[in-house]
Image (cartoon, coloured by chain):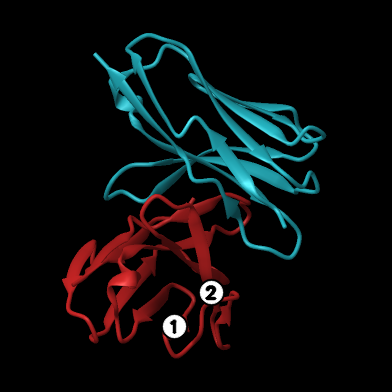
Chain colours: A cyan, B red
Amino acid sequence: KQEVTQIPAALSVPEGENLVLNCSFTDSAIYNLQWFRQDPGKGLTSLLLIQSSQREQTSGRLNASLDKSSGRSTLYIAASQPGDSATYLCAVNQAGTALIFGKGTTLSVSS
Amino acid sequence: SAVISQKPSRDICQRGTSLTIQCQVDSQVTMMFWYRQQPGQSLTLIATANQGSEATYESGFVIDKFPISRPNLTFSTLTVSNMSPEDSSIYLCSVEAPGEEKLFFGSGTQLSVL
């Protein structure tokens, strides 16, 4: 059974710092992996989707990497801003199942 | 992309009552998904709703407790029936927009059961 783990559960950093959020999964047979951002009262927003054949995807200050063989993904946020404060979720997509989510990392960026 | 309007955004309900959550999508989609997020937990899929057929429920979820309607390709409802405090969660609807693999989510319904 696929399990998705995110470390750390919470992270506090000062504005301007670069940071890395980690996601690991137990079964490497995935189609893709997505990173989402969750804001209170605003649902989830898809940030990046990495296909199983890809190594990384970039969008602005965000860079997500995928090492399928080791079951790991990272989300790199450059030059963090207070507006980046949110909960970040990773989710894997496998054949025959719905997206399987981690519990998320709650990020707080102070000004 | 897809824009999803979900309501209510939050509600406080009494034990034993039922609440119906609505999701409206700005485009026609084949499948709509309903998720639950319990406090401190990850999202768990409740069921997949296809237009014109009965919803498909995941293990641990049953139609009597979570009846779902899908009358057309842009709308769905989820009812949480005979509520207990254990049903206090965030409920989210989600769709996969045509031609895209990304999932788009509604803003969620924060449910508290007293």
Same-chain status of marks 2 and 1: yes
Residue under numbered circle 2: B47
Q: Is B35 above or below relative to A81? A: below
* Local SS, label 2: strand
Q: Is B53 above or below relative to B114? A: below
Residue A11 occupies quadrant: top left
Give the numbered dot on residue A59: none
Q: Residue at x 43, y 55 (%)?
A: B105
Verify CB contact (< 8 Å) between mark 2 and mark 1.
yes
Mark 1 — on which chain does it sit?
Answer: B
Residue under numbered circle 1: B68
Q: Residue at x 57, y 49 (%)?
A: B102
Left or right side of B28 for A13: left
Closer to the camera in the image, B99 or A46: A46
Q: Amino acid at mark 1?
A: Ile
Q: Position of residue A16 (x, y in %)?
A: 37, 9
Mark 2 surroundings within 10 Å by alpha-carbon count, few (fewer than 14), some (14 through 19), many (20 or more): many
Q: Amino acid at mark 2?
A: Ala
Mark 2 — on which chain does it sit?
Answer: B
Closer to the camera in the image, B32 or B108: B108
Left or right side of A51 for B103: left
